[in-house]
Amino acid sequence: MNDKKIRDVFPDMVVLKNPKRTEFFSNLSLPSYMRDWLTMKFSDENGETDLDRVSDYIDNYIPGKDDFEQFKFRLINGETVRFLARLRVTVDIKTGQTTFELPDFGGTRAGAGGVVENEVIESWQDTLLKESENWGIVELMWTRDYSTKKANGYIKMIDYSPFCPYVVDLEDYREGRSEFSTKEWIDVLISAADYNPDGYDTEKQKLFILRRLLPFVERRVNIIELAPKGTGKSYVFHKISKRGWLISGGTVSRASLLYDNAKKTGGLITRFDFVAFDEIQTMKFVDPGQIQTALKDYMEFGEVKGFDAKMEADAGIVVLGNVDAEKFNTKLNMVDEINPMFRESATLDRFHGLIPGWEIPRMHQGLVADGWALNTEYFAEVLHLLRDEMQYAAIVDECLDVPDKPDMRDLTAIKRLCTAYVKLIFPHATCKADILPEEFIKYCLEPAIEMRQSIKNQLCAVDPKEFDVPGKRNVPDITYRY
């Protein structure tokens, strides 16, 4: 990594990462995006961080889950409290009030919610009402509603400031990308995701790491990663971005995942850019047949349905599973160890690609980001904004020569994966001519075809009568259009 170059090109959006500081924040159970925000807040121009000030800030402003009862006690005794929190804001049509809840402290049911003052929502409505969830510094007080005989007490949000202290400008990001070669930019991406590009033996290993970022940058990318333990697969989906959600073990219901008919509200899939299932071997589903049917429908059409309602969503579905060494071959049945929810052929066919995690080195100290890199919080926000950029799909359409009568799921998968790769590696491109043919083939088309072919191989292993036949065994022969 060229530290000087990345500091010159992105002077306000870089942070000095090092393994010791990463360990410090890891011990505090803080995600990477929050770590880099705090690092930038309390670092000098040389990147040296005052960890004592960081610790004081965390003690004062980032409460643990068990601290909220003390906050409630302080509130009802006349104090105001101020801290950093994740919040959801909604407008209640019946009462005419704007309400909030803090899901990390149990939400409204646990008393972690209330009313937002009009002045606050007027000042920050583009932030608070545009996204389903936000992070920010909230200031709360307790008051009473004297319009009722009981004069019930409630919490009011009297001030707010956003967690993200800057506006992300995609044009600046695109211009910055144009200053780097493709190989240099791959290293920029790797370090932004908290890995050390110098710790990998080959470019191929780096490209396998980038596959994990595809659901971050493109809508409804569905992938499976099968890997030995210790390759860091859950870290990326848990710690890099506040826009994704990792479900690790436990029990999953249709209401929590897709749509809650009682509350008439969307589940996780409607609120995040991706939902990842970790420890999938041990995960349990309530009414699995019902969830599977609804999930297949969502993965195909992007619609979440309730009994009497329907809404669109664009979250990718990510399945993370462990696999033993004797099965490091996509032509073998590798999915028989994951939850039955995902290994039935009709569901499996709706996944766009597979990541062979055994090709990624087991995490070691040399793979932890070390040096100047893009602030992970900024990087994650850029990836989120790129999801809405439609011009990249048009570039991909220009680049692909598609045979007659291709299988639609294969074609959709390859196009969607190619588009995600273009957004990651060539965000500065505005037309086909901006990407060298050999680079599009190497970094976009070939990986997309390989990922989808791995899914086809699994379909042949799981349901040979349906898929292991001429015409269905392989993906369409899609090539570059010169």
Image (cartoon, helix red, strand yellow):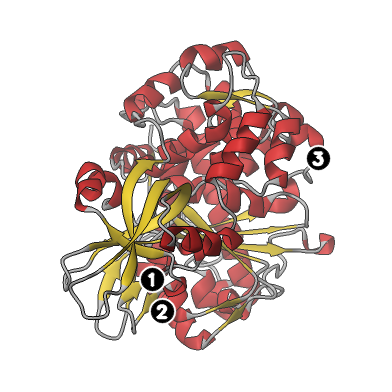
Label 1 sits on a secondary structure element that is helix
Helix, strand or loop at mark 2 = helix
Q: Nearer the viewer, residue 326 or 257?
A: 257
Q: Which residue is mark 1?
A: 298
Residue 364: give its label.
Answer: 3
Q: Is residue 436 above or below residue 447?
A: above
**Disc ID at residue 466:** none
User: Would you name the residue on which mark 2 appears?
Assistant: 294
Which tag is nearer the camera, tag 1 or tag 3? 3
Q: CA distance from mark 2 to mark 3?
A: 40 Å
Residue 318: image quadrant is bottom right
Report whether residue 200 is seen: no
Q: Residue at x 57, y 13 (%)?
A: 45
Mark 1–mark 2 CB contact (< 8 Å): yes
Assign the N terminus to one quadrant of the image: top right
Q: Quadrant of the C terminus?
A: top left
For the point 43% across and 20% down, the residue is 176
Left or right: where does residue 377 sit relative to residue 116?
right
Residue 114, image x, y percentages: 33, 64
Of 42 and 281, nearer the camera is: 42
Which tag, 2 or 3, sits closer to the chain's start?
A: 2
In the rendered view, tell whether residue 149 sits above or below residue 11. below
